[in-house]
Image (cartoon, rainbow, N blue to C red):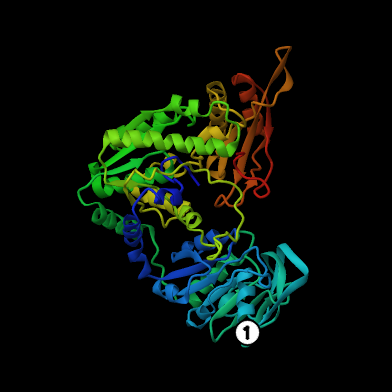
């Protein structure tokens, strides 16, 4: 996800800065037109793939929403879902305190699809038996189909599915039958056709599952009878109408980062309310080489959208003096951003509204959809803080305008394309909110930033020249200023720093693999960095996938 100190601020802390009535009214405005249409509800039991399930549903042009696993059947009915999906999760259904859904939802007459843990939970709550399997299944497995109807219509027997389970359904609930099996799992897919209850022990939503999208389409269209009403044009039309209704004649402030999220939001708002929008760009000094200048020129001269440029580089750098711990870096950058933002908004204001490029993954995370309702403890494990920074202070009062809060990154790109954003912005690779500050391991200094900017520019230039930019999720450099190695340059001994190349492929950023780019490209990048970037005498390649690593180093 493209992150910025302005557009994807942590939603939970931001909510503290606005009145509850403002937040509620804003949420109603952005969802009213959606609820009346076809939608699939996804109950989140802590799976790392819950968001991915939602994205896969949206790819069928049907709206989907991730909800807390403990939502009551009464509240669920208010959303009028056409179908319900129970996600996977890290728990075992027989563990003490294992998350459970409202059993009444199985009596609503709405089709249900349980995925992995969701299938086991449905089986157990409806009278079946789940036990620890003699042999777990992890990774690829061949699915043998026993009943090629309904959920498995047009799905070939023997195709590969992605497994990740140590438990299995041993005894089926009354009315259920087996749809498919694997070598290790007799009940790999099950169904009660009469009640339209289905379960799969694998993950159809991941790219490794060959027939996964066919199953999802079968559930969405054949079983749930949804209509393909979730389209880009319809979203833009509704959003413009809602923005105008919410804002009226009043002013809106948008903190612009230059990423696809905030740029798309700027275009959408400008189309809706014109000069009532004020864009502010805070240059914290951690952007890539020449990006701030390019951003302001592009918006002012080509798009005719005025941008208030704020140079705060020295302030941010001073805050990070002597700081080496990644989490502390993020917090300090966020805190300083708040101060600068508050000062500049008062200078440019007053404003009634703050526009944010909050995306749906931010909303899901801040809502703690898989947190236990009694203890507040999350079912899933959080690896590290989000790359986005900050929140707003309690005394800074705005009403939020967040028209992108129901969109995933790929959906934002589609909206940007339809609105006329140039390809260089729409296809811009994700860039973290703290910027280069989390791509320098250790203390941040002006010299180190300049070194990394020069190396990063070479990476981007050569990736573009090789025609690889659009094939990669991210391509960037990491500086290791606390590490030195011996080298030889011009018959002289050097003792300088290494630069790490991080080139990855991914569909959504949740999982990633290192990119198998041509050796010639790696050679060119290495030669140029060593010869052109002062203080660097070695270039290394990071070939770690995610998981176990993360894409960013900090």
For the view shown, which residue lies furthest in the left direction? 249
User: x%, y% of residue 486?
Assistant: 74, 20
Looking at the picture, does residue 433 appear above or below residue 237?
A: above
Q: Is residue 182 visible?
A: yes
Visible residue check, residue 299: no
Please tell me which residue lies in front, 540 or 376.
376
- Furthest residue to the top? 491
Asked whether 523 or 553 is in front, the reply is: 553
Residue 427 vs 460, above or below: the answer is below
Residue position for label 1: 176
**How many numbered marks does the figure carry?**
1
Task: Please indicate whether residue 108 sits to the left or right of residue 26 in the image.
Answer: right
How far across and down, in percent of the image, does residue 307 sit?
32, 34
Rendering quarter of residue 7: top left
Residue 237 lies in quadrant? bottom left
Local SS, label 1: loop
| Residue 159 % position (x, y) | 67, 68
Q: Residues within 10 Å of mark 1 (few under 14, many from 20)?
A: many
Looking at the picture, tell me which residue is in the foreground, 456 or 275. 275
Q: Residue 137: x percent and y percent?
A: 74, 65
Residue at 33 percent across and 65 percent down: it is: 32
Q: Quadrant of the C terminus?
A: top right
Q: Is residue 427 above or below residue 366?
A: above
Give the image quarter of residue 485: top right
């Amino acid at each position: 996800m493209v992150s910025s100190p302005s557009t994807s601020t942590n939603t939970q802390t931001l909510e503290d800065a606005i009145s509850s009535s403002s937040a509620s009214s804003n949420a109603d405005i952005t969802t009213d037109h959606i609820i009346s249409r076809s939608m699939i509800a996804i109950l989140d039991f802590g799976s790392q793939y819950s968001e991915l399930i939602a994205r896969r549903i949206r790819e069928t042009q049907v709206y989907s929403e991730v909800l807390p696993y403990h939502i009551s059947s009464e509240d669920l009915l208010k959303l009028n879902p056409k179908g319900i999906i129970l996600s996977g999760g890290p728990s075992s259904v027989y563990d003490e305190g294992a998350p459970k859904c409202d059993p009444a939802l199985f009596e609503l007459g709405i089709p249900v699809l349980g995925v992995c843990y969701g299938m086991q939970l449905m089986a157990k709550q409806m009278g079946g038996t789940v036990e620890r399997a003699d042999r777990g299944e992890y990774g690829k497995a061949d699915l043998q189909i026993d009943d090629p109807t309904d959920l498995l219509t047009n799905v070939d027997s023997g195709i590969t599915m992605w497994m990740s389970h140590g438990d299995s359904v041993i005894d089926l609930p009354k009315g259920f039958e087996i749809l498919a099996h694997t070598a290790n799992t007799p009940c790999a897919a099950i169904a009660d056709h009469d009640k339209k209850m289905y379960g799969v022990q694998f993950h159809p939503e991941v790219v490794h599952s060959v027939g996964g999208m066919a199953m999802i389409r079968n559930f969405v269209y054949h079983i749930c009878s949804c209509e393909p009403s979730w389209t880009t044009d319809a979203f833009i039309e509704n959003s413009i109408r809602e923005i105008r209704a919410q804002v009226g004649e009043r002013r809106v402030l948008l903190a612009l980062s230059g990423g696809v999220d905030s740029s798309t939001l700027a275009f959408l708002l400008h189309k809706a309310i014109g000069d009532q929008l004020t864009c502010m760009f805070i240059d914290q000094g951690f952007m890539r080489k020449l990006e701030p200048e390019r951003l302001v020129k592009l918006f002012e001269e080509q798009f005719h959208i005025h941008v208030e440029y704020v140079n705060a580089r020295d302030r941010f750098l001073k805050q990070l003096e002597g700081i080496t711990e990644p989490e502390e870096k993020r917090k300090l950058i966020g805190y300083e951003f708040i101060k600068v933002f508050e000062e500049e908004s008062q200078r440019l204001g007053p404003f009634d509204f703050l526009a944010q490029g909050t995306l749906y993954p931010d909303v899901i995370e801040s809502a703690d959809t898989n947190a236990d309702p009694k203890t507040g403890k999350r079912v899933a494990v959080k690896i590290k803080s989000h790359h986005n920074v900050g929140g707003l202070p309690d005394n800074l009062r705005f009403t939020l305008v967040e028209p992108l809060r129901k969109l995933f990154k790929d959906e934002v790109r589609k909206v940007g394309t339809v609105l006329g954003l140039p390809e260089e912005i729409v296809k811009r690779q994700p860039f973290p909110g703290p910027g280069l500050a989390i791509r320098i391991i250790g203390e941040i200094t002006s010299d180190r930033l300049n070194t990394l900017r020069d190396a990063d520019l070479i990476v981007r230039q050569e990736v573009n020249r090789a025609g690889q930019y659009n094939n990669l999720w991210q391509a960037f450099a990491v500086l290791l200023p606390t590490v030195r190695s011996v080298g030889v340059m011009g018959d002289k001994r050097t003792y300088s720093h290494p630069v790490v190349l991080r080139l990855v492929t991914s569909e959504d950023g949740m999982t990633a693999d290192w990119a198998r780019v041509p050796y010639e490209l790696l050679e060119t990048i290495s030669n140029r960095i060593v010869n052109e970037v002062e203080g660097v005498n070695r270039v290394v390649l990071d070939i770690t996938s995610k998981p176990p690593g993360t894409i960013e180093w900090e």
